Amino acid sequence: MSTAALMEKTRESEAAHPYLRGNFAPVEVETTAFDLPVKGRIPEALEGRLLRIGPNPARAVDENTYHWFMGDGMVHGLRLRGGRAEWYRNRFVGSDSVASALGRPRLAGPRNGFGDTANTNVIDIGGRAHAIVEAGALPVELTYELESVARSDLAGTLPHGFSAHPKFDPAKDELQVLAYQPGLEALSYLTVDRAGRARTVAEISAPHFPMIHDVAFTASRLIILDLPVVFDLAYLAKGFPFAWDDTRTPRIGLLPRNGDLSGLRWIEAPSCYVFHVMNAFDAPGAVIMDVVRHPKMFATEHRGPDEGDSPLVRWRIDLASGALSETVLEERGCEFPRFNDAFAGREYRYGYTASLKSGDRLGPNFKHDVTRGRTEVHDHGPGRTALEPVFVARPGAKAEDDGWVLSYVYDAGRKASDVVILDAQGFSDEPAAVIPLPVRVPYGFHGNWLPDPA
Ligand SMILES: [Fe+2]
């Protein structure tokens, strides 16, 4: 298919639904493109794949019931090696819905009885890429070339569903995971080792079925965000069964990392919703966590997240008094916080986000100095809008921000996306490299840099 024909198949939509319009619109085709053009120089140390996933309905959806979080999964990948952009691929993630829409065989593997759409993150588990999601559906293993292999219960070690946000702990060389699903009255604190085997550390009672999208940890504690968005049967028929619940008191759970429930302590939190924690760490007499705070969630807008601006804030929980105090690190709305993963769970200085203003949505990327409350901006230019920035450390780096920030950037003028590589220490400068892709990468959720095995 020619590039022009490809782009015609990936055109923007003028749908009324805000999460089907413009670059939220799904793309119809699976593209494979080799030897992509490069502006600038791709650092030769970057050898691997930049993966990204998001919702991309495989067939027309009912705009009255569609929720952004519920679309079929599509994974995108850019393979870099030796300073070259060897390929770009996008593939639907296998599910019953995708198989039915595209006339494909149903995916093999176990089921967990709560849907099978994995659309929210793509990470390495046990040396292989997996598409993952929260609230019940199992991970889907992918080949190097992003074809779906099978649903996976991690060789029988996963007791039920997984999470969209496992957090890698470099100190323990394992993932920290908090899984939940409607119908199960407990949250599961799991770890996953390098071989991809899950271990259940604790089951935490939560009979009100909260939506807990992310988790954080410090050297001593797991941090549980039990905020007022809960499973609501009344919304099931409307397509997305979670909504704001004013009757819930927002709280944060501090659980010892050994899972000892007798040490679980609940702290009252501000009324808000938090999808994402940037990082957290222990401080003398306190726990510090940096979060993107939304005023509410799914209270007035049920088609996707949009309840007002979402500043980046620092919460300090005083362990003696149990009081939580807040400092605003960046008042401009932002989302998709990332940082140098080597600093997970310990004191750090730099984080990276995407601008997300209520109403006019996406734009630049931000680099935050969380110790000084300062923000650098990388404006990608007119009509160019960034998604989640992924930090990749330079091999042998000594400084926390010695590395690159990689983003998929949509170019409304070209109606296609680029991968932009910034030098993190020259964040506002011209990019180190820009790799124009032949097609759009719709706005979506999360991704990661998966380096090739050494
Ligand atoms: Fe997320």
Image: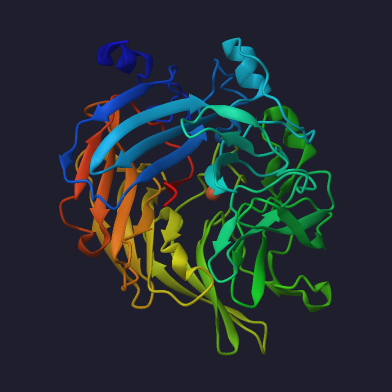
Q: From the viewer's perspective, is residue 43 above or below residue 81?
A: below
Q: Is 381 or 139 nearer to us in this picture?
A: 139
Residue 290 can be seen, yes or no = no
Residue 360 can be seen, yes or no = yes
Q: Position of residue 107 (x, y in %)?
A: 67, 23
Q: How many marks?
A: 0
Q: How is the image coloured?
A: rainbow
Q: From the viewer's perspective, is residue 160 above or below residue 440?
A: below
- Residue at figure coordinates x 26%, y 13% from the top left: 4
- Residue at figure coordinates x 81%, y 60% from the top left: 203
Q: Position of residue 209 (x, y in %)?
A: 78, 50
- Residue at figure coordinates x 64%, y 69% from the top left: 269
The quadrant of the rendering that contains the N terminus is: top left
Q: Quadrant of residue 318?
A: bottom right
Q: Is 170 or 96 nearer to us in this picture?
A: 170
Q: From the viewer's perspective, is residue 1 above or below residue 129?
A: above
Q: Image check: 232 left or right of 239?
A: right
Q: Quadrant of residue 81?
A: top left
Q: Image check: 10 left or right of 16?
A: left
Q: Quadrant of residue 39?
A: top left
Q: Position of residue 294 (x, y in %)?
A: 52, 56
Residue with the most extreme front position: 454
Q: Position of residue 153 (x, y in %)?
A: 73, 41
